Amino acid sequence: MTAHPVQRALAILEAVARLGPGATARQIAVFTATPASTAYRLLNLLVADGYLVRIEDLSGFALGRRTRELAGAEPEEESYESVLTELRGRVRFGIHLAVFDGTGIRLASRDPDHAPAGEGTLTGHPHASAVGKIALAFHPALFADRSLPGVTHRTITSPDVLSAELARVRQREIATEVEESRIGRCAVAVPVRDAHHVVCGALTALGGSAGLRVDDTDLADLLHTYAARLAGVFGPVATGRRTETCG
């Protein structure tokens, strides 16, 4: 059944509230499952009526004065586990959250329905995993002087090839692995940033080679959308205290 325009508008307002200030039109469209053209039209109407505002650099949206007046109070903060649970309900792959704690990589949240096999490889051989490539791309000092063993026959073992791949990861803000840490497994990962915009973790989808396509743009967009939501609640994952961040 086609959603009524009012329902779509309310869904967009809810998306901006959940994603936080700076939510982009693309993220909002993915979050609400709204066609891009419809999302842009409704966003412009909501801005014109004062329910949304464009942030200063025009890169995204935030709730406007009229929406805040209607709300009357600050919404309850959501936890990172509630964000992950929602995402896990939308995909058929394992969804895991990793954090970079200053000494390496650890999994802060494992999908209870898709336990990651070979977890030690995911965190111990960063050049072979999508999560690890995010860490290497944005925090190379954490892994200085590490060797590049061939975990499988598809693992990147050439420093030059890995360097080129990490440059692409930094540019696209997405990392992939195709049977590099475990035969039969593929993964896609995106960075998660703290309140200071520092990459302090990664959100990843793990799945079988026959089912997970690393070039699936819809999956990548979904991960980016939820990673943006995690940015607002990421502090407690890494430090246990909301007054600190992992950056």
Image: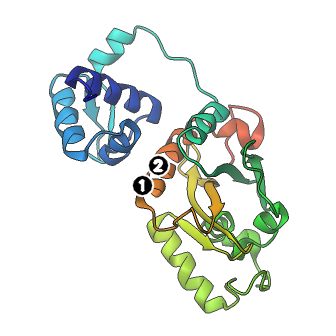
Q: Which residue is mark 1?
A: 218
Mark 1 belongs to which amino acid?
Asp
The residue positioned 65% from the left and 58% from the top of the image is 206
Among the 4 quarters of the image, the one containing residue 5: top left
The residue positioned 75% from the left and 78% from the top of the image is 144
Element carrying mark 1? helix
Q: Tell me the number on the disc at residue 193.
A: none
Query: Is 247 left, or right, of 169 in this rendering?
Result: right
Please indicate, yes or no, whether residue 247 appears anywhere in the rendered image: no
Please indicate, yes or no, whether residue 159 appears anywhere in the rendered image: yes
Measured from the top left, where is residue 168 in percent x and y?
49, 75
Vertical arrangement, residue 209 with respect to residue 105, above or below: below
Q: Tell me the number on the disc at residue 222.
A: 2
Measured from the top left, where is residue 203 in percent x and y?
61, 52
Mark 2 belongs to which amino acid?
Leu
The residue positioned 45% from the left and 67% from the top of the image is 172
